[in-house]
Amino acid sequence: MKYDSCRPIAVTAVRSQTRCNHGQVTAVLQLLPETPIVPAYVKLEDGSCQREGNGFQPQEAREVPLTEFVAARSEVLPVGGGLSVQRAVAEDGTEQNLALLRGDHWCVPEDVGGQLRCVDRARARPSLFADASCTAGAAAWDTCAYDDPIAGIVSPKQPALAFTYAYECSFEGPFFALGGEVTTPYSDAVGSCSGWPQSTYDGVLAVSDELSPSDLPALELISKGKGRLKALNLGHDGAMLLGPARWADPFAELVAYTYHMAFYDSELGVECAPRLVEGGDIRCVPSFMEGATDFADSACTEPLITEYDTCEPPQFRGAVSADRCTVTELYGRAEPYEGPLWGGGEGCAELGTTSAGGRPVYRSERIPLEDLARLEQVR
């Protein structure tokens, strides 16, 4: 099956079906080159067969025996500070760090009160209660949200951390450890304390001790390199744990804001990530706001950068191709602008003035894509 994606897919995996659709790999199919697109059919739960109509482009493929792939095992290595590294060790001796663990739970870097901490990926929301008076906190969890970084399957482990999802520019907490299972949860969502159907979740756990952000493992960004680009590695106490290759795929569909950048561009003074740009090169592109909505002229040819209420004031504005795979334009923030605003979608109409909007507005300067640092994939 050939999917519409930024990178042609040569192989695809067949997985066993689970409630969350993340089962074990049972087969690998390799697309046969130069084969025509053919009709495809799917077997439904009732046993009937119907033609696939979801826009995929089926092609003939051959099954690749799983024994043809290099076998590997998983290892967990403690690194201190409550942090461990999960890595794969291949039968040919190749090793690669793949994920970070807090205890035995996969954790990811998050900004917690201005500090980089490793926060559990499997987390519960403390929105329920363990008693009929709604005074003892409880937290619900759902395994479908928590993927195993090694096997690509849903982890059946109960989470060990709970916190509310209120997020401004960093996670402030409070954070809670989790205790035993709550068989009869309650909720005050309707204004009174009443029973809550547990079937809504995989389970409900009692909320126990409140944790300080300092109880979460500390992480740091360690830069490495002597040229224009410095690779940003995730580390702890001076030791590098995960390299930038784990964070960025230049052929992935573009997202306007990416929290984790792979490199630091010393010439531009910003973090950047490898992206495919117009012309076919891979360049290190800084995070940018996508598209221009405000312009300084009646022909809508001079894009402006407006400082919206975001965690990081936008320094760049850019455009991407229709398939969202390629950066086509990039503008950097220039001097402040005051005056009329133009825009309006398909047409170009006067929208008002900068003073009416109440937000800082800046002119922009086009940055030639060839001026960005060029990268190459080395295998």
Image (tube, rainbow, N blue to C red):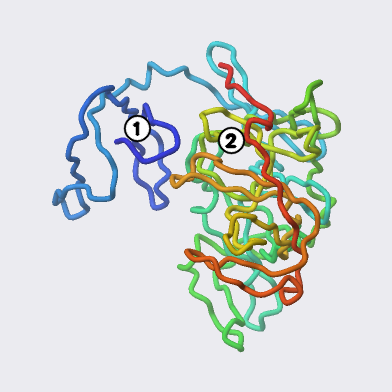
Indicate whether 186 appears above or below 306.
below
Can you tell which mark lies on residue 158? none
- Residue 266, given in percent of the width and then of the height, sits at 80, 32
Q: Secondary structure at mark 2?
A: strand
The quarter of the image holding the C terminus is top right
| Residue 77 occupies quadrant | top right
Q: Nearer the viewer, residue 215 or 49?
A: 49
- In the picture, measured across the screen, residue 343 lies left or right of residue 18, that is right
Farthest residue, direction front? 298
Instruction: Look at mark 2 in the image and give the residue it sits on.
Output: 275
Gap between marks 2 and 1, in whole Å?
Answer: 32 Å
The quarter of the image holding the N terminus is top left
Q: Secondary structure at mark 1?
A: strand
Kindly identify the residue that appears in the image at 64 percent across and 46 percent down. 258
- Residue 156, given in percent of the width and then of the height, sits at 52, 48
Indicate whether 358 appears above or below 105.
below
Farthest residue, direction top? 92
Tags 2 and 1 touching, CB below 8 Å: no
Instruction: Tell me the kind of residue under disc 2.
Output: Arg
Indicate whether 50 appears above or below 361.
above
Kindly identify the residue that appears in the image at 60 percent across and 72 percent down. 350
Instruction: Look at mark 1 in the image and give the residue it sits on.
Output: 26
Indicate whether 54 appears above or below 125.
above
Instruction: Tell me the kind of residue under disc 1.
Output: Thr
